[in-house]
Amino acid sequence: VSLQASGAGSAITLSWGGDGNPPDTQYRWSVSPQGGSAPAAAGAGTALQAVASSLSCQTDYTGSVSALNGAGLPSAAISATAETGLCPPAPEVGLAIDNGLGQTSTTSVTLDVSASDVNYAQAQLQMRFSNDGSSWSAWQPYAATAAWTIKGAAGPNTVYVQVQDPDGGTGSATAAISYDSSLSPLSGTAGQPCTYRGLAALCVNSPLVTAAFAMPSGSVSMEVSFDNADWSQPEDARAAIDLVLPGGSGLKAVFARYFGQDDVATAAGPDYFVLATAPPAITSLGWLNDAAVTDAGAATLVVQASDAITAAGSLQVSVSGAASWSGALPAGGAIPLTLSGSGYVSVTVTVTDQAGNSTSQQIGIYNP
């Protein structure tokens, strides 16, 4: 048997001639780091070529081949040496758990995986996951999301991901989520109806929401998307689904498509949400004409407030303490009050936006 070895990328290719051996002759081969004892790859068969992949780049390896006789006994091995080549850049990988929600009361989570490779499309990549960085799931085709079960230990739980391209280039990332089984199970909020830039939506202050759709009759499965282009994995069809909105504050659209037994897609939605996590700001709070004393218990409070999402006229104001009042922030901000008590009395003013975020301030006045 004559042997040639060549290296390219992270692979070593062994090629040998049969030298007159019958076509059904079995050959045993192995590839080992030069100077090493344990093979990095090995195999057997009737083929006259073998490829050892996922090796270390720019490393010398020794390949060995022997022929087996009818009794299965090997001939003297022949060897050849080759060096692996330069490895192409590994895929760039990102990982988030439950869209970065931060905590969970259940061990079932959704992994959000991003990956890009300079030489290969995402459809050519594969990925796998681990809870400890050593025991891995089976390789599976790359997808933007994957269902996963964390360890369930109290406190931070880390998940590891590896994404590999056809050359064996492997990129990795980790993410953590805090697990606390005593937390109330998270459930989506339907939100409060609001208008944002002229668009009817639901304003929410948490990324965990319940999206609702008109489900066509006979639907069997469904998929959802945040951009009407990248779709989730199919799941059982239903009219309402709990989701974690992506990104930070702002307008979000949730699209759905339903499939019946004929596997034909029917579009639904979008369901619009406005995610707002910052409270409104009370920009000015005082008494009309800078009054320091009530007029027989009467005084007019002037409130000015703003919010990144909710228009001023849609902010809700409540007054408690020495006086009570609630309603939408009036144009101009003037709120007539009748105060109780005597001496220096105070009221607490709370401003709430359409997403449920609120902020409060106190102010006082002398009531004879």
Image: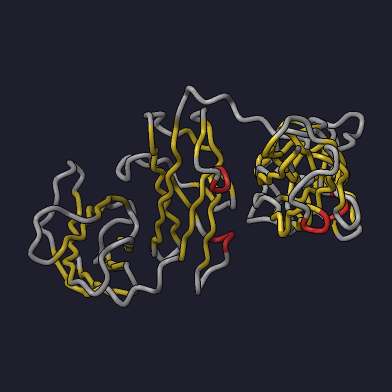
Query: Who's the residue at 87% across and 51% down the image?
Result: 334
Residue 269 in percent (x, y) is at: 86, 46
Residue 53 in percent (x, y) is at: 33, 61
Which is more toward the observer, 184 or 49? Answer: 184
Res. 228 visible in picture: no
Looking at the image, residue 310 lies above or below residue 265: below
Left or right relative to 210: residue 47: left
Looking at the image, residue 96 lies above or below residue 119: above
Query: Who's the residue at 42% across and 45% down the image?
Result: 176
Left or right relative to 127: residue 348: right
Residue 113 in percent (x, y) is at: 53, 53
Which residue of the protein is positioned furthest toward the front in this rendering?
Answer: 368
Which is more toward the observer, 244 or 70? Answer: 244
Looking at the image, residue 288 lies above or below residue 223: below
Left or right relative to 190: residue 89: left
Which is more toward the observer, 297 or 210? Answer: 297
Which is more toward the observer, 117 or 60? Answer: 117
Query: Who's the residue at 69% across and 39% down the image?
Result: 346
